[in-house]
Amino acid sequence: MTNDRPVLVSCDDYNDYLCKYRYVERQFNELLAWGFLKEWGVPVPNACLVTIRPDHISAEALQARARLAFFDRPVFGSLYSQHSREVDNSLTALGNNQADVRRIRNRTDLLRIALFDLWMANEDRNGNNYNLLVVPVERGKLFIHAIDQAACFNSGHAGQYALLPLTEDDSVLSTDFCRTLYANSPAFKIDGEIVLASFRQKVALCAESLPKILNFVPPNWGVDLAVRQRWLLENLFAAPWLKQTEELFREYMQRFSR
């Protein structure tokens, strides 16, 4: 758990955003992962950088250890939807009703998210804290959305540590939610291979979009973008790490399907 204590902010575009404000490095992780997930085609809530006026900060936020200095800079905000719900283990009760399970239309994206987390070393999406939303769309259909990528790079920041592989328990592949969605279906292996086959292409898209994403980082976040970009290219996009990610994904897929 990243314990970021987000606040709900009503903005002048007439939308509400869940905003993180405490840690610049975690907001950097959020921004980078959000941009990469968009390149992967994984559904995520719309996001933006939000400037919050000091006189708009509530007493409740200040009592929750917010400091006015946290809002001297733009903060990362994710669009809030009152009709979505967070995935937790109570949702596995859907497995008792296959009609409800079939309302989720993008279960392959759960496997994409699992592979993405292995690549980004995201330690905070598992059976204890899914960091997924189920969002209703037209005609009762549901779509999985990924949220809260603050714990990428092994809960640090790009360049702080050498990348370390996630354990099986750190992967959403090992969760009851994944078992419920696939329920011993042969589609699990087929979908996994489809996801794996496009991995290098998705990574290449992320490498291409990296300079554009970094351009959105506010200067007063104090991030050395040249250093950060070089580290990402030399580590996150390095051939040995990509190969290890593919092998680990296939290993965890095989354990799940036994």
Image (cartoon, rainbow, N blue to C red):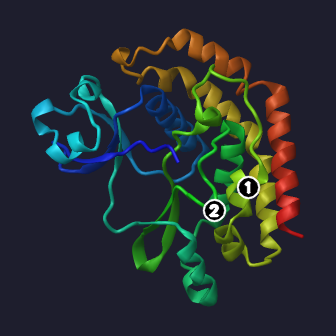
Q: Alpha carbon of mark 2 to alpha carbon of mark 1: how far?
A: 8 Å
Relative to 123, 45 lies left or right = left
Q: Secondary structure at mark 2?
A: loop
Residue shown at 15%/44% (left/top)? Answer: 59
Specify whether 248 is left or right of 208: right
Q: Amino acid at mark 2?
A: Gly
How many neighbours does mark 1 have within 10 angstroms: few (below 14), some (14-19), or many (20 or more)?
some
For marks 2 and 1, the one nearer the N-term is 2
Please state the horizontal and vertical placement of residue 115, each as a whole percent of the image.
71, 48
Q: From what the image shows, is residue 49 above or below residue 197?
A: above
Residue 47 picture quarter: top left
Q: Nearer the viewer, residue 128 or 228?
A: 128
The kind of residue on which mark 1 rests is: Asp
Between 196 and 52, the residue placed more toward the observer is 52
How crowded is the residue under tag 2: few (<14 C-alpha within 10 Å), some, or many (20+)?
A: many
Q: Which residue is mark 1?
A: 169
User: Callout 1: helix, strand or loop?
Assistant: helix
Q: Which mark is residue 127?
A: 2
Residue 34: give x, y in percent of width and height: 50, 40
Q: Kindly check if marks 2 and 1 are in contact, taking CB atoms under 8 A apart as contact.
A: yes
Q: Residue furthest left?
A: 55
Q: Nearer the viewer, residue 89 or 110?
A: 89
Q: Quadrant of the C terminus?
A: bottom right
Above or below 201: residue 214: above
Q: Position of residue 130 (x, y in %)?
A: 56, 59
Q: Residue at x 63, y 19 (%)?
A: 159
